[in-house]
Amino acid sequence: GVLNRCESNSGIKPTTSDKLEESVFCLLRHTRRMCLIFCIFSIVKGRLVIWFITAFIGLQLFGQANRLKEFRKELILATSDSAKSYYHSEICYVWCESNFDSALFHAELSYDYALKSGSTILIRQGIMSKGWAYDWAYKFDSAKYFYKQARTYSKENDDLKGEAIATFNLGVTHYYEGNLDSATNYYLKAEPVFRQVGDFLNLSRLFNNMGRVYEKTGNSEMALEVSRKSLSLKSQLKDTKGIINSLTNMSSIFQRIDLYDSALVYSERSLALAEQ
């Protein structure tokens, strides 16, 4: 239940180069071959930059339809309010990447079914799902409203993990708004709780996102250190998507310090996994 766009998009609010990347992405999204050919190298501000982030995002779109198909099939078969709430939340998360209206629609259904089920965890998840929809649409004020609501609800119901997830997601919104100090504060509050409850998947995502903060602030050494921690945890958890994200981000860090051979190695590893 963690919004992990820092891993998948690897950036804050669009800069000029980000907007150019988005334009390229619109051309690449329709064919896998074009994605592989055109997003390896691009010239940005006079420098050669490896853009496997674009490749990864493009390849992700090809899996979106399959995930929606699988979740919809399960939703049709679901008989309990708990199951319906769960699958509506999952469908919401998939739609977050491309369709705000559909994401919010399923988030609201997830919350409604959660209320009927009486499950505090699903109610928290339903509230969080609304935050996802707004967050991915860059409507951060609304996103933060629902994340804070989810955090308060979790605290009232002694749900440490839920409280940490909501705190982490607040950090993500601040990151994308460019408030890196605030993002770091939220991440640091969530980290010990993830350790305490044994939530190593979300801890790996937190390390990944801290790497993005360190990279943005010019601390490449710390960026690589926490990114390696993230990669190690994800490898232990066999989190293929997460591994791809970490490899992509580490490639970006090596680019920033002009180690292009290392950047290319990590980018090639990332793309090879994404193709599988």
Image: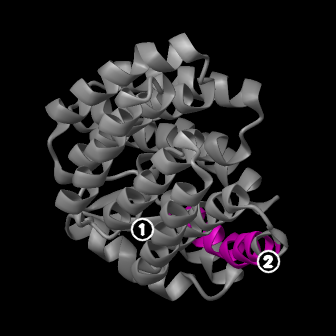
- Residue 18 visible in the displayed image: yes
Element type where label 2 sits in the image: helix
- Residue ID for mark 1: 42
Q: Position of residue 88 (x, y in %)?
A: 61, 67
In space, the residues marked 1 and 2 are separated at their CA atoms by 44 Å
The C terminus - image quarter: bottom right
Q: Nearer the viewer, residue 35 or 116?
A: 116
Is residue 148 shown above or below 158?
Answer: below
Q: Quadrant of residue 175?
A: top left
135 drawn magenta: no
Q: Taking 95 as reference, is 46 left or right?
A: left
Pointer 1 or 2: first along the chain: 1
Q: What is the x, y in percent for residue 189?
A: 31, 20
Q: Is residue 239 found left or right of 245 in the rendered image?
A: right
Label 1 secondary element: strand
- Identified at 70% across, 75% down, the residue is 68
Range shown magenta: 54-73
Image coordinates of residue 145 in percent, x first then y, are 22, 53
Q: Main secondary structure of the magenta part?
A: helix
**What residue is shown with label 2?**
76
Q: Residue at x 41, y 28 (%)?
A: 164
Q: Is residue 96 visible to us here?
A: no
The residue depicted at 15 percent of the width and 30 percent of the height is: 181
Amino acid at circle 2: Ile
**Which class describes the residues within 10 Å of circle 2: few (<14), some (14-19), or many (20+)?**
few
- Residue 242 in the image: above or below residue 200: below
Residue type marked 1: Ser
Crowd tier of the residue under label 1, counting other residues whose Cα lies within 10 Å: few below 14, some 14–19, many 20 or above: some
Quarter location, residue 192: top left
Nearer the observer, 149 or 210: 149
